[in-house]
Amino acid sequence: MAKIITIAHQKGGVGKSTLAINLALCFQDQLSVAVADTDHQGSLYHLKDELPGLTIIGADQFKDLHQLDYDLVIVDTPPYLSDQLPELFRRSDFVLVPTKAGFFDVMAIRSTLALIHQAKANAAIVLNMVKPRTSLTNDVIQLLAEMQTPLLKTVIHDRVSITRSTLTAGILNGNDPKAKAEIMALAEEVVNYIIL
């Protein structure tokens, strides 16, 4: 049975799709991996030709995620709270919630976390697209600490190389060692939450 990692946040622009692609590329050397694009706009699904070494399946192809013939399926979710999220959270082995280090991003995360808690899902938050030397980050960390969901130690910074990584075959194929180190550290932390 496939292990399921779902990446969710009701707010758009927090880097869900970019993290989904780069995490999948981190794991694909050791596991058979697919990325499931559940957004009906199909943003990731339309990138499948740009990432020929990675299997990307569309919303219509994953009736039963655990039965797919992969070791790991990483699910990218739409930038809104859809009716399918509660069931998806229940079926996930781990839910990763990326958020920017902004007040409104943190406030928006509450609805997503409420659904995750109702589903009793195994989940954690990762600070993503963080501007360097931001004093707001410490305030955000304190706000997130009150939300009863673990905050990962890894912080993904706002880097051009990461933003462009879906067009350059992933961050592991690029030449930004700091970005690679951050994505690899995130993958290692995620592994600690699930047994592959």
Image: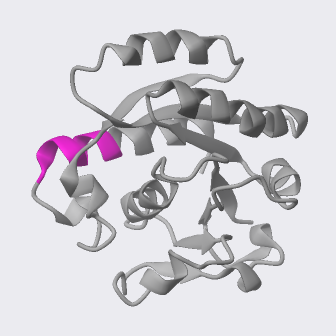
Quick check: 27 left or right of 176? right
- Count every numbered label the image shows and give the total: 0
Q: Position of residue 21 (x, y in %)?
A: 43, 64
Q: Toward which corner of the image does residue 117 lie, by quadrant?
A: top right
User: 85 and 169: which one is in front?
Assistant: 85
Quick check: 13 left or right of 87? left
Q: Position of residue 23 (x, y in %)?
A: 43, 56
The residue furthest left is 175
Q: How is the image coloured?
A: one colour
The residue furthest front is 104
Residue at coordinates 52% horizontally, 76% vertically from top-left?
43
Q: Position of residue 34 (x, y in %)?
A: 55, 73
Relative to 52, residue 54 above or below: above
Quick check: 55 left or right of 64? left
Relative to 189, residue 94 above or below: below
Residue at coordinates 43% horizontally, 45% vertically from top-left?
187
Quick check: 3 left or right of 176? right
68 in the magenta segment = no
Indicate the quadrant containing the N terminus: top left, top right, bottom left or bottom right: bottom right
User: 47 and 104: which one is in front?
Assistant: 104
Residue at coordinates 64% horizontally, 82% vertically from top-left?
58
User: 182 and 13: which one is in front?
Assistant: 13
Q: What span is colored magenta in the figure?
A: 176-183
Relative to 22, residue 62 above or below: below
Q: Position of residue 163 (x, y in %)?
A: 29, 57
Residue at coordinates 87% horizontally, 59% vertically from top-left?
83
The kind of secondary structure the magenta stretch mainly shows is helix
